[in-house]
Image (tube, helix red, strand yellow):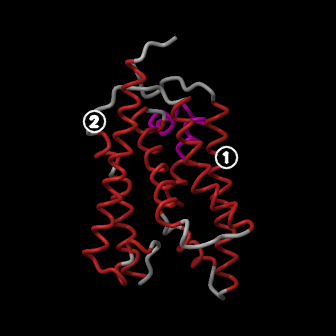
Amino acid sequence: MNTPNAHWPHPSLTRLVALVAWFGLGLQLWLSLQLVAQQGKSATDGLVIFMGYFTVLTNLLVAVSLSLAAGLPTSVAGRWFRRTEVATAVTVSITLVGLAYHVLLRHVWDPQGLQKLADVALHYAVPLLCVLHWWCVVPPRRMPWLAPFAWAAWPLAYLAYALLRGHWLQSYPYPFIDVGVLGYPRTLLNALGLLVVFLLVGAVFVAVARWRLSTPTR
């Protein structure tokens, strides 16, 4: 039976994934602040832009959750993030980051140098490492098939935040939710499509966890 404070093996892998996420976030923040400085804007402007992206916020969720799970495993937050359902929700969210970027955004721009390194870290390395971490570290549990609907609270909260923020700043972080260009009907339709993808990915994780429990250990 899985419990909130169930033992996680391979603590070095948990720390590695957290470290890669923190590295990518730190590098991207530094690059963002440099860019706004070149444009004559303030560091506050750079931070506001930086915190507008689902990629950044979800990588931050990964970094914080795994840091607490590894560094403070007996704390309230550490026990919470070590729960199989919570760890799976985080993994599904960062998997969506990688899939959405690869399918929708990688052709939009061509980052170079350090920006390319940050881009790969946040959109590819962390998602892939998180899936590996989920397989190797997070204890499988028979989660309900409807669990992904609860996990969808994170992307739905981000959508509300992005739309409110975009209305206030008149700037949207992603072209597929740019209300100024697309209008609300198309924007919400695009968001619905991404939500369906999130739910399908979540269902795959639930199915894999159930399969692992039903497969005899050799």
Please name the residue shown 38% across and 57% down the image. 155
Asked if labels 1 and 2 touch by Cβ distance under 8 angstroms, the answer is no
Nearer to the camera, 46 or 106: 106
Q: Quadrant of the N terminus?
A: top left
The earlier-in-sequence mark between 2 and 1 is 1
**What is the magenta segment's predominant secondary structure?**
helix
Residue 184 is inside the magenta segment: no
Q: Circle 2 sits on which residue?
A: 145
Q: Circle 1 sits on which residue?
A: 19
Q: Which mark, residue 167?
A: none
Q: Position of residue 149 (x, y in %)?
A: 28, 46
Residue 77 is inside the magenta segment: yes
Tell me the mark number nearer the camera, choosing from 2 and 1: 2
Q: Secondary structure at mark 2?
A: loop
Please name the residue shown 40% across and 31% down the image. 208
The vertical placement of 35 against 11, above or below, is: below
Nearer to the camera, 175 or 80: 175
State the extent of the magenta-drawn residues as a range: 64-80
Q: Position of residue 161 (x, y in %)?
A: 38, 67
Q: Secondary structure at mark 1?
A: helix
In this view, the residue farthest toward the bottom is 40
The vertical placement of 55 against 81, above or below, is: below
Q: Amino acid at mark 1?
A: Leu
The vertical placement of 68 against 214, above or below, is: below
Q: Position of residue 103 (x, y in %)?
A: 48, 60
